[in-house]
Amino acid sequence: MKDDNTLIPIEETSITNLIYTIRGKQVMIDRDLADLYQVQTKRLNEQVKRNSARFPEEFCFRLSTEEKNELVANCDRFTTMKHSSSNPYAFTEQGIAMLSAVLKSDIAVEVSIRIMNSFVEMRKFLLSNQQLFSRLDRVELKQLETDKKLEEVFNYIASNTEVKQKIFFDGQIYDAFRFIADLIGKAQSKLILIDNYVDVNTLNILCKKNSEVDVLIATSGKGNLTTKDMNKFNAQYPSLSVKTTKDFHDRFLIIDDKEGYFIGASIKDAGKKSFAITKIEDGKLVQDLINKVK
């Protein structure tokens, strides 16, 4: 295990091979994450325990003995866990995003972005092939090792109808994160985020955008976003620009200069307190917001 802050080059394809489907969720195991973050597994889990409020079960859960045994049986590199009295933790995509905040290192931020990019690419693959998958009959589906992943895809498609208003209550962090990420994923060319409190957690959500989408953040600068954070984001997810303005109090998300949403809380804090997201039906109001940002 390295003790310095040198980032070891990681291929996103190799990260994809570390993603498993457990309890119907795509997850990564704590010791794999520790290797990527260049920390001890014990230290990683200690940080999670110290910040337990940030890791609800939707973000992180401990494997049962049966789940651990199945993992060991299918993955030779986990054989050392076979006789361990402690079962490993599994982290969902949102839990991995939160890890970058609690580990507080440049490596953690960089690696978390790459990991989430791998999650995005895996979802794109499954979604782009959903027509092929839908033609398979039930017998063929049972023969696939990707049953659970397909189920997630179909559930997503079935529930992916437009929602014009949504309220999230305290603790619904995963639901809020997923809803905002889905909105961001709708953009085809441009996103405008108006939010006075932005930091690296904001960028962790914005990286859900499509690769050809440009992002403009209008903010008063009250958050902790640094030039270094912006440069790292732009290196992998161009292009991001930030405009400093004190013209706004509320938060808004504008998609492709056409679709606007009022957001009752900074997206970095989504789900930590009760808040609402409402679609702005008046196109003129959306255009007024765009003109104000310019």
Image (tube, rainbow, N blue to C red):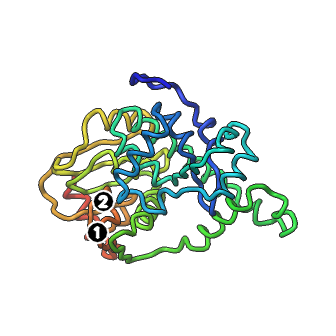
Q: Along the line of sight, which residue is nearer the eye, 9 or 85?
A: 85
Label 1, label 2: how many angstroms apart (C-alpha)?
A: 8 Å
Q: Along the line of sight, which residue is nearer the eye, 268 or 18?
A: 18
The amino acid type of the residue labelled 2 equals Asp
Judge from the rendering whether residue 66 lies leftward or rightward of residue 117; answer left or right: right
Task: Please report the residue visible at 62 percent of the width from the left and 42 percent of the height from the top.
Answer: 18
Give the percent coordinates (x, y) of residue 213. 44, 48
Task: Please report the residue visible at 20 percent of the width from the left and 65 percent of the height from the top.
Answer: 250
Q: Which mark is residue 269?
A: 2
The residue under label 1 is 273
The amino acid type of the residue labelled 1 equals Lys
Identify whether 36 is placed above or below 52. above
Question: Tags 1 and 2 in contact by the CB under 8 Å rule?
Answer: yes
Give the percent coordinates (x, y) of residue 9. 52, 26
Q: Along the line of sight, which residue is nearer the eye, 105 or 146?
A: 105
Give the percent coordinates (x, y) of residue 165. 37, 77
Give the percent coordinates (x, y) of residue 145. 77, 55
Most distant residue in the left direction: 246
Q: Which mark is residue 181?
A: none
Q: How many marks?
A: 2
Q: Along the line of sight, which residue is nearer the eye, 37 or 257?
A: 37
Label 1: few (<14), some (14–19) or many (≥20) C-alpha neighbours in 10 Å = some
Most distant residue in the right direction: 139
Task: Please report the residue visible at 52 percent of the width from the left and 54 percent of the height from the top.
Answer: 92
> Which SS class for mark 2?
helix
Identify whether 242 is placed above or below 285. above
Task: Please report the residue visible at 45 percent of the width from the left and 53 percent of the height from the top.
Answer: 95
Judge from the rendering whether residue 248 lies leftward or rightward of residue 284; answer left or right: left
Label 2: few (<14), some (14–19) or many (≥20) C-alpha neighbours in 10 Å = some
Judge from the rendering whether residue 46 lies leftward or rightward of residue 41; answer left or right: left
> Which SS class for mark 1?
loop
